[in-house]
């Protein structure tokens, strides 16, 4: 293992910002969810990198966190996509700028 | 006889010895990959021939017997036919996805052979979480099915792809759950450990294969059903049945791409059969203590061939299931039964501590009953409304 | 050297997939590039000796979440495939600078830290047995909570996306 920790952290930072920019800038709700998943994955990568390079790697704390994070993300994606489908049924659109009936 | 048993390992070491020391691991890895791909590609060719001949015999006719003695060169003829066919891509198809779909389907399936133990010391990679690797690879092929169906821009393709994905994700659950008791009792996810846990001999002569226990037999049956469905094989071949939906997600594929899909399906079947042999049928162990002298890879190959024959036999025998029957079967029968199987395995483990020596047959009967009653009850809930009472029209 | 090449390949696959997922016009291509990004991340986890997590990432993200996303794209026909429709939401001029700001903060924090030269202390073993023991001993409460959470998510997803029965008296469809 000759790559330093900073490489992994930079990859995670880039991934996070790409996910954030995409989630804030795209019009389709499903793409906002994809951006959200990319952000979660970037955080997971950070956890695993710090677990691997940290002093207490035997405690498996970082690994455990990521296992639970993946499980929670799976549940969240299921419910989020069900919401998108329900919204599509009522409003016939999934473009986020048209879902403004609660505005004002 | 251990020379013969380890002949492939020794051959690999000798060949890798010719390479300079820094690249030796790479050379031995490439050798293992080449060997696996050659063996299973030949197996694919022979299986296509064997399937047609066996199906023919079971349907009271000869199979192909024109090309070569007993039709042995038929796979060569099939290969040439597939290669010289024109590769038609629909005009409005998504060209990139249409091209990538067969590759994304076929390439990961070969990875599954990396963790199977083909004989003593003959695992390509001994992963700590080998069986998890196997299931992860199996689930990566569903995206390729979607890509194939969607990129063809054809209603039948899309509907076929949706049905195929629904079937594959539904049957992934019993596939994984049915192997869980074996993992639980072996205490490890590594396939080498699972094979080693089936290594000792009960009563001095009968091997402790998982299939000789009630939960192992049930698990084997559940796994074989789920593997048949995962590989879109009859009686679960609704996504590609010609009388149902033309060819489903394969409609717009011809020539070499179709051959790649075909190859991917069969190689997936081989991987499933290999895992069934490893987890339930004792891997490379002999069934009785007296037959240990035969090479371990020969035992693996023999059990593997028997399972392939079983798959072909089932294809010749059972009619196709409808989509709702298929999905009900997975979710309302196989998944609860897999969970009950876990309880049966736990009961078997705890009843192993019974003090009286004649416990073995009673143990077997009790644990089998614990499985058979929910099986019967769940099967009852699956049955449809049944035949309506007969209505007689008399001429009066 | 080999380690560096592996890292560069996996990281570039991940980042290329992520950028493509957020920038392409065709939704199905976006979803498949996102699946490629998840697979690249699984490769990075495997390189970091987190074997169980890497394989679980492949199984769950590529094998389940990507397929869920693809199904949703199919069921909610996206209107952006036509060339004239804009793909960015009206507030994109806020979103992109925020992303750039977050990136600048994170990269600044990484560059100013000693992690630039930090190498791992030693070989790390995370066998599945240890993970199982940790789950059953120290982390048993989160495990049970996750079970409850996933059950609730399953039921919730089914209930939310259930088709309402057509009621003749109700005014909404």
Image (cartoon, helix red, strand yellow):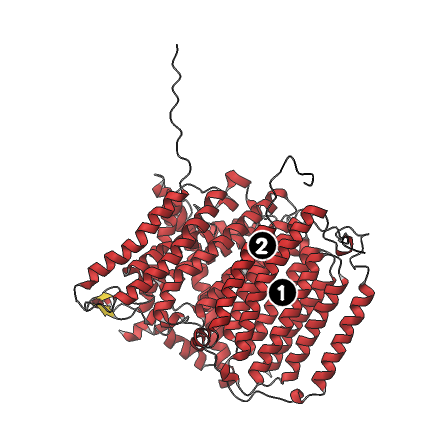
Mark 1 sits on what residue? Answer: C36
The numbered dot on residue C138 is none
**Front-most of B228 and B82?**
B228
Q: Chain of mark 1?
A: C
Q: Chain of mark 2?
A: C
Residue B287 visible (yes or no): yes
Mark 2 sits on what residue? Answer: C157
* Residue at the (44%, 78%) spot, across then down: C130
Q: Does dot 1 land on a helix, a strand or a loop?
A: helix
Q: Does dot 2 land on a helix, a strand or a loop?
A: helix
Judge from the rendering whether residue B110 lies leftward or rightward of residue A18; answer left or right.
left
> In this rendering, do the residues under marks 2 and 1 share a single chain?
yes
Sequence-wise, the earlier of marks 2 and 1 is 1
Q: How many marks?
A: 2
The picture places residue B31, in percent across and down from the top left corner, at 46, 72
Q: Are marks 2 and 1 in contact (CB under 8 Å)?
A: no
Judge from the rendering whether residue C118 lies leftward or rightward of residue B77; answer left or right.
right
Looking at the figure, which quarter contains the C terminus of chain A? bottom right
Q: Nearer the observer, disc 2 or disc 1?
A: 2
Categorize mark 1 by other alpha carbons within 10 Å: few (<14), some (14-19), many (20+).
many
Q: Quadrant of residue B58?
A: top left
**Front-most of B282 and C108?**
C108
The picture places residue B96, in percent across and down from the top left corner, at 67, 56
* Residue at the (57%, 70%) spot, across then down: A69
The picture places residue A22, in percent across and down from the top left corner, at 73, 65
Q: Marks 2 and 1, Cα distance to the nearest angstrom?
A: 25 Å
Categorize mark 2 by other alpha carbons within 10 Å: few (<14), some (14-19), many (20+).
many
Residue B63 visible (yes or no): no
* Residue at the (59%, 80%) spot, across then down: A49
In this view, B104 is above or below A70 = above
Q: Quadrant of residue A73?
A: bottom right
């Amino acid at each position: 293992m000759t790559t330093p920790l900073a490489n992994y952290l930079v990859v995670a930072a880039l991934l996070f910002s790409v996910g954030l920019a995409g989630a804030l800038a795209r019009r389709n709700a499903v793409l906002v969810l994809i951006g959200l998943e990319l952000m979660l994955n970037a955080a997971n990568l950070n956890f695993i990198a710090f677990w691997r390079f940290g002093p207490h790697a035997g405690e498996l704390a970082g690994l455990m966190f990521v296992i639970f994070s993946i499980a929670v993300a799976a549940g969240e994606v299921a419910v989020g996509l069900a919401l998108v489908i329900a919204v599509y049924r009522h409003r016939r659109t999934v473009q986020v700028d048209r879902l403004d009936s609660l505005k004002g | 006889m251990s020379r013969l048993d380890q002949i492939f390992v020794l051959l690999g070491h000798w060949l890798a010895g010719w390479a300079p020391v820094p690249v030796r691991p790479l050379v031995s890895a490439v050798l293992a990959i080449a060997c696996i791909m050659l063996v299973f590609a030949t197996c694919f060719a022979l299986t296509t021939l064997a399937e047609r001949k066996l199906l023919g015999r079971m349907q009271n006719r000869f199979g192909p017997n024109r090309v070569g003695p007993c039709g042995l060169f038929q796979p060569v003829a099939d290969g040439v036919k597939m290669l010289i066919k024109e590769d038609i891509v629909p005009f409005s198809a998504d060209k990139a996805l249409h091209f990538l779909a067969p590759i994304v389907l076929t390439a990961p399936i070969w990875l599954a052979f990396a963790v199977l133990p083909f004989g003593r010391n003959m695992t390509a990679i001994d992963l700590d979480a080998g069986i998890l690797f196997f299931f992860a690879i199996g689930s990566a092929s569903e995206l390729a099915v979607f890509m194939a169906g969607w990129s063809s821009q054809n209603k039948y393709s899309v509907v076929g792809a949706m049905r195929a994905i629904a079937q594959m994700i539904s049957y992934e659950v019993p596939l994984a759950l049915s192997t869980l008791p074996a993992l639980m009792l072996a205490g490890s996810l590594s396939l080498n450990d699972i094979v080693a846990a089936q290594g000792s001999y009960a009563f001095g002569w009968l091997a402790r294969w998982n299939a000789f226990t009630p939960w192992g037999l049930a698990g084997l049956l559940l796994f074989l059903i789920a593997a048949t469905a995962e590989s879109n094989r009859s009686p679960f071949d609704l996504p590609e049945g010609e009388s149902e939906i033309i060819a489903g997600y394969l409609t717009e594929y011809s020539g070499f791409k179709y051959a790649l899909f075909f190859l991917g399906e069969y190689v997936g079947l081989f991987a499933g059969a290999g895992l069934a042999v490893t987890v339930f049928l004792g891997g490379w162990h002999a069934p009785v203590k007296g037959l240990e002298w035969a090479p371990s890879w020969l035992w693996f190959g023999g059990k593997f061939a028997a399972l392939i024959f079983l798959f072909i036999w089932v294809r010749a025998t059972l009619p196709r299931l409808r989509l709702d029957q298929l999905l009900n079967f997975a979710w309302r029968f196989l998944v609860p039964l897999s969970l009950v199987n876990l309880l049966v395995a736990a009961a078997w483990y705890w009843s192993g501590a019974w003090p009286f020596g004649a416990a073995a047959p009673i143990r077997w009967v009790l644990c089998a009953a614990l499985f058979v009653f929910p099986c019967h009850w769940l099967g009852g809930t699956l049955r449809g409304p049944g035949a309506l009472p007969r209505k007689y029209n008399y001429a009066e | 050297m080999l380690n560096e090449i592996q890292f560069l390949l996996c990281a570039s696959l991940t980042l290329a997939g992520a950028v493509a997922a957020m920038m392409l016009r065709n939704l199905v291509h976006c979803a498949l590039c996102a699946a490629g990004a998840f697979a690249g991340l699984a490769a990075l986890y495997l390189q970091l000796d987190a074997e169980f997590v890497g394989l679980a990432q492949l199984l769950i993200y590529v094998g389940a979440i990507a397929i869920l996303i693809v199904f949703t794209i199919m069921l909610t026909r996206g209107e952006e495939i036509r060339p004239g429709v804009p793909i960015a939401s009206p507030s994109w001029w806020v979103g992109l600078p925020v992303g750039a700001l977050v990136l600048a903060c994170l990269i600044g924090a990484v560059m100013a830290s000693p992690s630039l030269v930090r190498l791992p202390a030693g070989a790390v073993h995370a066998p599945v047995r240890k993970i199982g023991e940790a789950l059953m001993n120290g982390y048993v409460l989160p495990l049970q909570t996750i079970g409850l959470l996933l059950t609730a998510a399953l039921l919730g997803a089914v209930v939310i996306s259930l088709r309402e029965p057509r009621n003749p008296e109700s005014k909404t469809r």
